[in-house]
Image (tube, rainbow, N blue to C red):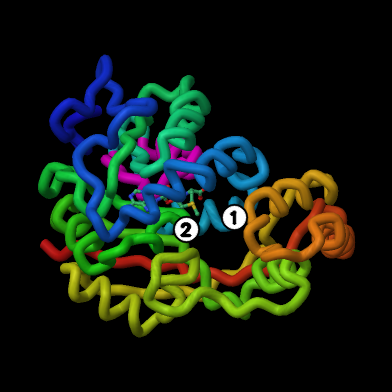
Amino acid sequence: MTDIAAAPNCSDKGRSFRTGGTVDGQVDPTNAAQERAWDGTEGGLWAAHADLLEQMPARYDAALLDAAGIGPGARVLDIGCGTGSLTRKAARRAAPGLVVGVDLSAAMVEVAHTRAAGLGNASFLRADAQVHPFPTAGVDVVVSRTGASFFGDAPAAFANLARATAPGGRLALLTWQAPSRNEWFVEVTAALAGQPMGGPPPGVPSPFALADPDAVRALLGGAGYADVQLTDVREPAQFGGDPVAACDVMADLLGWLLDGRDAAEARGALLDTMRAHEGPDGVTFGSAAWLVTAIRPG
Ligand SMILES: C[S@@+](CC[C@H](N)C(=O)[O-])C[C@H]1O[C@@H](n2cnc3c(N)ncnc32)[C@H](O)[C@@H]1O
């Protein structure tokens, strides 16, 4: 496995994986705050609630994997892989090719490692994808499901990923459109905060940092990609079959939005919202994403 994501000391019996301790290689100073969050409380919550959070954007997976063009034998990187649900699906398509999931969070990488135990061609690396010294031209495909919008220096990060991609290789990203187009964000945050919330400011690392198509074209073109295309894709965001469980998970994750508000009142409002969105497919909200594809020129 070390051949496509190798960095010094990142091999453990052929698996590029570590729990705890230091990140393989360095974390860029521009990603220090993200590392604190994802390798701290936030990542711990995502690991604890992996079942629901893996499912949330899963309706997009088939389109994302089709766009990535992953076939048997492909060498694949999954950037910001989290607990590895896309990595596992990519590994099934790529076999016998190797797939490496890369993430800042030790807790999430540990869950990813456990969940991929039956797959001999998937492994995980705890590293900062922005600066990790991936072998040059070592992979055929780079994918990411909502994991590539948190870079402190996005031009440097995508240049690093372009360098890692073999000539003719592909990039395929799923990334959220603007907050206002994502009912899950609008309604969940408003219920918890007690008032409508704007999204994060543009240009800062967040789930919505790649929401502007012109900015994405300029970013990826500048990083060394060609034929950058964005496709408007819309699927229900899935929050599981139980409104109470959905409420508990989202209240845990976004508790900081309460900002002094009575916690029981906020939780009650969120539960009402979850119940209002319960249907035959469980609790679902509208969502809108960009399917971004690009080619690494030969
Ligand atoms: C929204 S989660 C998405 C997780 C996963 N792709 C999924 O769809 O379930 C974003 C992930 O990106 C990871 N991440 C953020 N910045 C990163 C970086 N510089 N290098 C590697 N991973 C990063 C976080 O640790 C987190 O797991």
Image marks 1 and 2: residues in contact by CB distance under 8 Å = yes
The percent coordinates of residue 123 (x first, y second) are 35, 30
- The residue at which mark 1 appears reads as 57
Q: Amino acid at mark 2?
A: Thr
| Residue located beneath label 2 in the image | 146
SS at badge 1: loop
Residue 54 in which image quadrant: top right
> What stretch of residues is rendered in magenta?
74-94
On whether residue 85 falls in the magenta region, the answer is yes
Instruction: Examine the structure image and report whether residue 106 is included in the region drawn in magenta.
Output: no
Which residue is pictured at 47% across the width and 39% down the height? 84
Q: Image quarter for residue 99?
A: top left
The residue at 13%/42% (across/down) is 135
On the image, the x and y values in percent for residue 186 come to 68, 73
Secondary structure of the residue carrying numbered label 2: loop
Any atom of ligand 1 within 8 Å of the CB at mark 1?
yes
User: Where in the figure is residue 238, as x and y percent of width and height?
Assistant: 70, 54
